[in-house]
Amino acid sequence: MKLLNRELETAIDMALLSAQESGELPRFEIPRIPVSAPKHAEQGDLSYPAMGLAKLARKRPLDIASLIADRLPSLDFASEIQVAPPGFINCFIADDYLKRQVDAIIAEDDSLFQLDIGCGKRAQVEFVSANPSGPITIGHTRGAVVGDAMARLLEAAGYHVQREYYYNNAGSQMIKLGRSLMLRYRQQLGDDVDLPAGYYLGEYLIEVAADLVAEHGDSLRGKGWEFFRDAAESRMFDWIKRSLASVEIEHDRFYNETELFESKKIWDVLDRMRENGHIYAGAYWEGADEDEIADVTAKSYEPATWFRSTTFGDEKDRVMVKSDGAPTYTLPDIAYHCDKLERGFDIAVNVLGADHFSQAQVVKHGIEALGMDPAPIHVIFNQMVRAVRRNEETGELEAVKQSKRAGDFDTLDDLVEMTSADAVRYHMLARSPNSQLDFDVDQVVKQTNENPVYYIQNAYVRCAGIFREAEERGFDDDGADLNLLGDDELRFIRKALELGNVIEQSVVNYEPHKIAFFAHELAAVFHPIYDKVRVLHSEAPPATAKARLRFYRAAAVVFHRLLRLMGMSAPERM
C-alpha cells in the first residue's frame, strides 16, 4: 500500500525542482515539509503548507502554492488539487481510488502497510530491565507494554528487531533478596528468626521457602545467602516470564550486567575514556566550589575516579569508580550501551522510568567520550502509573491496595486477574508515556462503548458476526462490484489509509501510543457506518450487499492489523 502523504510530498518536490530549473524559483535546498490531513473535510484529504518556503523562495506563499500546483505530475489517487490561502495545496482523494483500495487491503491482510523504512536494518528495544527481586509491578508493566508495542511497530516498519532485558543480579538488592529468602527458609523449618528492616517482606518469598523445604528438607541449613539469591533469582525470573507472557510479551535475550565484569568490558571502557582524556582522579570534581571542597576535606574523602562529563554539557562531572575501587552504576551503564552499539544495531531504544532521565544523558555523554556516535540511542521515558477505583462514598479516585502476595496492589498478575490482558495492553499504551496514568480498574472492564478496549475490539467482532451470518446463508462477496459502495464506506477507507502514516510517525518519533489513538479514532468512524450500512437486510439488493460484505472484509483486516500492532487479541465474539 502506498503512503499517500509521501507520494504527494515527492510529487511536490519534483514540481519545486522543475520550477527551480526553469528559473521561476531560486535555487535552494528543498526542506521536508510534511503533508498531513487538514482539520476540515472541505479542505481535502491531504494538505501541504507552502508557507514554509516563503523565505527560501522569496515569494508569497500563495504564489508558491500556485506554482507547485501547476507543475504537479498526474497523481492516480487525486481527484482534485486546490490552492487555498494563505498558501495551502489541498488534495482530494478520488472515490475510484478509494474503491480500489478495498481489494488492496484484503490482499495485504496482516502485512497491511508493511513499510520498508528499516529494510536491511537492525533495531534493539530494551525494556522492563527490572532486577529479578520480585514480581512485575504496575510501573514495570507500563514500560513493558510501551516497549513491546515499539518493537511491533519497528517490525511493521521493516526493521529486524531484538527485544532485550538487562538486569543486575550482583547488587545490594539481590544480596538482600538472598538473605531474605534464607531467613524465610529457616522460618519454614521452625527457627525463631525475624527479617530486619529493609529486607523483602512479600509473601511470595514465603512460598519459595516452603517449596525449598518441600524439595530439600533441612539440608540447606549450611548454605550461604548466595545459594538463596540464586534460587530466588531463578524463581523470580520464571514468574517474570510467565507474567509477561500473559500479556503477549517475550524477550529474545536476557543480558546480565555481570557479563560486563566477567569480560572486563567495564575496565576496557574506562581505559578508553582515560586515553581520550575524559577520566581523572580526585577527592572532588574539578568544578567543585569552595563549600564542596571544604565539605570533602572535612570528611577526609579518598580520591575517586571521575568522568569529565561537563565537557559534553553535563551540569557536573560524575564518579565512575568510588574510592574503594567499586564502580558506580554509571560505568557499567556506559559499557552496556557501548556493547549495544558494537553489536551493530542501527537503532537502540531504551524504555525507562522518568527518574532515569539524568542517567540516560550521562550515558550518551559517555558514548561520546569513547569517540562513538550516540545518535542511534533513543530513550522513551515513562511517567508513574497507579491502579485506581472510584470511592462510592466520595466519588474520588483512590489507589487500589489489594494484593494477596506483596501487601500492595502493584503486580501485573493482579492487574490481569482483575481486568484482562487486552485491557492492560491498551490502557498502558493509550496515553503518552510523558503523562502520569491512572489505571481505572472499574472503567476498563465495562462492556460498553465508554471502554475503548471494548469499543475497538467490538468493531472487529461486528465484522466477524456479519461473516458468520453470511456463511450461514450461503452468501459471499466473490465478484463484488465495488462501484456500488457509498460515501459512508469510502469515508472509512479514507481514514483507514492513514494507518501507514501513523505507523511511520510512531516509529520515526518513537511514539508508540499514537497507534492506540488511531485505533480509537478509526472505531469512532466505523460504528456509525455499521449502524447504517447493512449487508444482509431486505432493503439491500444482492449486488449492493455483496459489495458491502467485501467492504466489511477490508474493515476486519484493518482492525485485526491494529489490534495485533498493539499486542491485543482480535476476538470473534464478545
Image (tube, grey):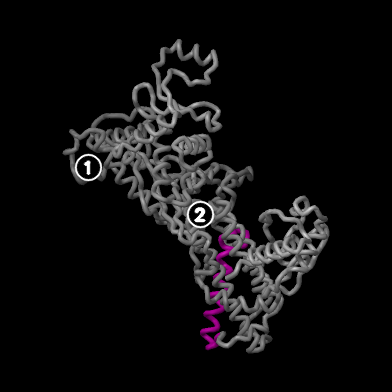
Task: Categorize mark 2 by other alpha carbons within 10 Å: few (<14), some (14-19), many (20+).
Answer: many
| Residue at the spot 52% in from the left edge and 30% down from the top edge | 311
Secondary structure character of the magenta stretch overall: helix
Name which residue type carries label 1.
Val
Q: Residues within 10 Å of mark 1 (few under 14, many from 20)?
A: some
* Mark count: 2
Residue at 29% x, 33% y is 179
**In what quadrant of the picture does the N terminus appear?**
bottom right
Please tell me in which quadrant of the rendered image residue 407 appears. Answer: top left
| Disc number placed over residue 456 in the picture, else none | none
Asked if 237 appears above or below 561 in the picture, the reply is above
Q: Quadrant of residue 210?
A: top left
Residue 204 image offset from top left, x and y in percent: 35, 43
Whether residue 448 appears in magenta in the rendering, the answer is: no
Specify whether residue 203 is in view: no
Name above or below for residue 326 compared with residue 263.
above
Please tell me whether mark 2 sits on a helix, a strand or a loop: helix
Q: Nearer the viewer, residue 229 or 365?
A: 365
Residue hosting label 2? 150
Q: Residue at x 50, y 59 (%)?
A: 118
Query: Which segment is the magenta one?
Result: 449-476
Q: Is residue 559 above or below residue 260?
A: below
Rendered location of residue 31, percent (x, y)? 67, 54
Q: Along the horizontal axis of the image, is 512 left or right of 494?
A: left
Please provide percent x and percent y for residue 256. Answer: 34, 43
> In this rendering, is residue 563 above or below 249?
below
Q: Earlier in the sequence, mark 1 or mark 2?
A: 2
Identify which residue, 38 or 572, lies in the foreground.
38
Residue labelled with disc 1: 213
Residue 383: image quadrant is: top right
Q: CA distance from mark 1 to mark 2?
A: 42 Å
Horizontal relation, residue 238 to residue 451: left or right: left
